[in-house]
Image (cartoon, rainbow, N blue to C red):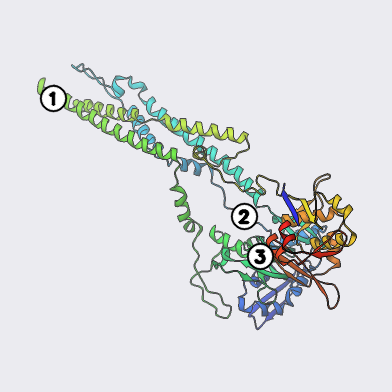
């Protein structure tokens, strides 16, 4: 019981398989007899024909031989030419993302703001009217009117130009900020997606970057793993996957090398463990093909193509990328930050009040001028009075332009951009400006702890053995007998799927792969002087019962003699303790384990 704390050969030949109706063109680049198209068609084989198709290739061993790889030793990590040739012929395990928006697209997006649109319209009207030459009025009782309430006509265009300049500044600042943040986030996403994949190379466990995974690699799959590529399963034990990401079916699917050998990229391991021979990566995997179709890069089957019943393929029409993303984009565009919503409502209110005021001013001036000129002064109508009416209209437009707060969007944009820069100094990267004011109203932030606030490494802090507690491995190592330590270390090492790898840098801690609790136990066994790899080789497992949330325990069966076996079990304390009837003492003897001892533990 442990208390744990988290801290070309140019020749080619054609082989046909009559029963599966699949045809493979075997080219031989660098001793690999299966081509890329062969492997894609193999993965796309219907489930009912999968076993027969795979059997005619010689099973998983035949596919591995055709790919020039050993299922036991994996690829040679020191043979860079072989790895490069596999990547060249079968592709890289990477799906090219969508092209980022250009600076002009971001400027157009920033221009869609309601306040910006109203300011632009008002600014252009003011700018155009400012360039219209008007003759001097003859002196009247009310005085001659000019643009902007008697201003100098030679500089009347400045007000409209200043509004346009303010709009351009807002659009440029917003677009440039979004462009920089998008570029930084793409770099962060590339780092986030670059996961470490557990593989077997040179016959030993190793970790490689997800993007460096190649066809022919042997991947170790464990509970909770996301399958990084398409492959064939072997050495599996109670392996069940959730393929809802690919098929939409929520039921777990059992996987085994005989009836259901294919593992698809993007699916999740929900139960069991196993190994996988990678046969399709990147854009050639099923998930990659779907991604290309969604982005509009792939070639979907045309509806006019005939359906071939023997092959089991049906022609379907796949929507283009722009159509497929319409709904999602519109949903994102509808999301408005609280401040932006308030600014839009304020702009509409000010616009309505300004429009009402400008209409009232224009009507009042026209009525007053008409009464004074034609009713009181009794002057005759002349075409020159058109200029007076136009001046009244220009004054109304001026009132409307002045009423709109052209500095408000600029001030808000500059303030938010300043906040983003300040947060960046604290290592907080913000994608959108409005996230600053949105997070300002947050009262509670929920964050994942493991691997986010902590280093995702665990250490054994206490061990209870033989009615005694030990706070360190050296103290237990001194007091426990050889037989006791052997059973304890064998239980930890054999009943585990985790691995401890050498540190990547001199003086650094060893690399832990797999379940972090198991890694902590393996490190504890190493501190007791055991080598878990040697113990695993010395005691082959004849049967494994993998951990599940229902059982809350994991067990392995290890043969001792031809007629005798030993079962190692670990799991939740309330489950395992209920199964115990005796306990191991420090001197290697056993004693009864009843309710009293159970309560004491």
The residue indicated by pointer 1 is: 371
- Which residue lies at the image location 30% right of the left edge and 30% below the top edge? 397
- Frontmost of labels 3 and 1 is 3
Q: Mark 2 or 3 closer to N-term?
A: 2
Q: Is residue 155 left or right of residue 225?
A: left
| Residue 64 spot, x, y in % from top left | 76, 70
106, above or below 139, in the image: below
Which residue carries the number 3 mark?
548
Residue 490 placed where, x, y %? 83, 63
Q: Position of residue 255 (x, y in %)?
A: 66, 71
Q: Nearer the viewer, residue 119 or 557?
A: 557
Residue 127 horizontal side relative to residue 198, left or right: left
Instruction: Identify residue for label 2.
Output: 96
Q: CA distance from mark 2 to mark 1?
A: 73 Å
- Closer to the chain start, of discs 2 and 1, is 2
Q: Is residue 64 visible?
A: yes
């Amino acid at each position: 019981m442990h208390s744990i704390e988290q801290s070309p050969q140019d020749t080619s030949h054609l082989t046909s398989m009559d029963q599966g109706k699949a045809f493979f063109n075997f080219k031989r680049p660098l001793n690999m007899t299966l081509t890329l198209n062969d492997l894609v068609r193999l993965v796309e084989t219907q489930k009912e024909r999968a076993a027969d198709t795979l059997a005619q290739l010689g099973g998983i061993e035949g596919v591995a031989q055709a790919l020039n790889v050993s299922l036991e030793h994996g690829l040679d990590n020191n043979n860079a030419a072989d790895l490069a040739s596999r990547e060249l012929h079968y592709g890289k395990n990477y799906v090219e993302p969508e092209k980022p928006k250009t600076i002009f697209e971001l400027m157009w997006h920033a221009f869609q703001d309601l306040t910006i649109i109203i300011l632009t319209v008002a600014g252009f009207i003011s700018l155009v009217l400012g360039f219209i030459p008007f003759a001097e009025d003859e002196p009247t009782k009310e005085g001659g009117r000019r643009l902007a309430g008697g201003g100098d006509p030679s500089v009347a265009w400045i007000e409209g130009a200043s509004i346009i300049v303010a709009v351009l500044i807002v659009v440029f600042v917003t677009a440039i900020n979004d462009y920089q943040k998008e570029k930084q986030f793409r770099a962060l996403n590339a780092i986030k997606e670059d996961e470490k994949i557990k593989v077997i190379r040179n016959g030993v466990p190793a970790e490689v970057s997800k993007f460096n995974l190649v066809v022919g690699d042997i991947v170790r799959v464990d509970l909770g793993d996301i399958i990084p590529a398409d492959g064939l399963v072997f050495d599996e034990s109670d392996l069940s996957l959730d393929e809802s990401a690919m098929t939409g079916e929520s039921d777990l699917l059992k996987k085994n090398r005989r009836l259901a050998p294919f593992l698809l990229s993007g699916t999740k391991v929900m139960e069991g463990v196993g190994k996988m021979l990678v046969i399709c990566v990147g854009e050639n995997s099923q998930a990659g093909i779907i991604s290309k179709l969604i982005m509009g890069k792939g070639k979907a089957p045309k509806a006019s193509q005939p359906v071939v019943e023997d092959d089991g393929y049906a022609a379907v029409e796949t929507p283009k990328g722009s159509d497929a993303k319409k709904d999602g984009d519109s949903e994102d565009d509808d999301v408005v930050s609280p401040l932006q919503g308030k600014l839009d409502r304020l702009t509409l209110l000010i616009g309505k009040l300004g429009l009402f005021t400008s209409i009232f001013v224009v009507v009042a001036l026209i009525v007053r001028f008409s009464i004074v000129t034609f009713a009181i002064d009794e002057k005759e109508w002349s075409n020159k009075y058109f200029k007076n009416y136009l001046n009244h209209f220009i004054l109304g437009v001026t009132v409307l332009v002045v009423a709109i707060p052209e500095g408000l969007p600029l001030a808000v944009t500059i303030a938010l951009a300043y906040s983003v820069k300040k947060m960046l100094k604290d290592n907080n990267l913000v994608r959108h400006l409005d996230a600053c004011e949105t997070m300002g109203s947050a009262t509670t932030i929920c964050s994942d702890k493991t691997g986010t606030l902590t280093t995702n490494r665990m250490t054994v802090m206490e061990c209870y053995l033989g009615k005694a507690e030990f706070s360190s491995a050296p103290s237990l190592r001194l007091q426990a007998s050889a037989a006791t330590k052997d059973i304890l270390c064998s239980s930890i090492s054999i009943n585990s799927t985790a691995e401890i790898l050498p540190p990547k840098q001199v003086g650094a801690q060893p690399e832990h792969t797999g379940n972090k609790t198991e890694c902590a136990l393996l490190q504890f066994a190493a501190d007791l002087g055991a080598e878990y790899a040697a113990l695993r080789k010395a005691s082959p497992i004849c049967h494994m019962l993998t951990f599940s949330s229902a059982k809350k325990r994991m067990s392995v069966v290890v043969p001792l003699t031809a007629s005798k076996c030993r079962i190692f079990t670990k799991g939740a304390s309330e489950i395992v303790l209920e199964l115990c009837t005796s306990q191991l003492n420090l001197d290697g003897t056993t004693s009864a384990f009843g309710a009293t001892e159970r309560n004491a533990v």
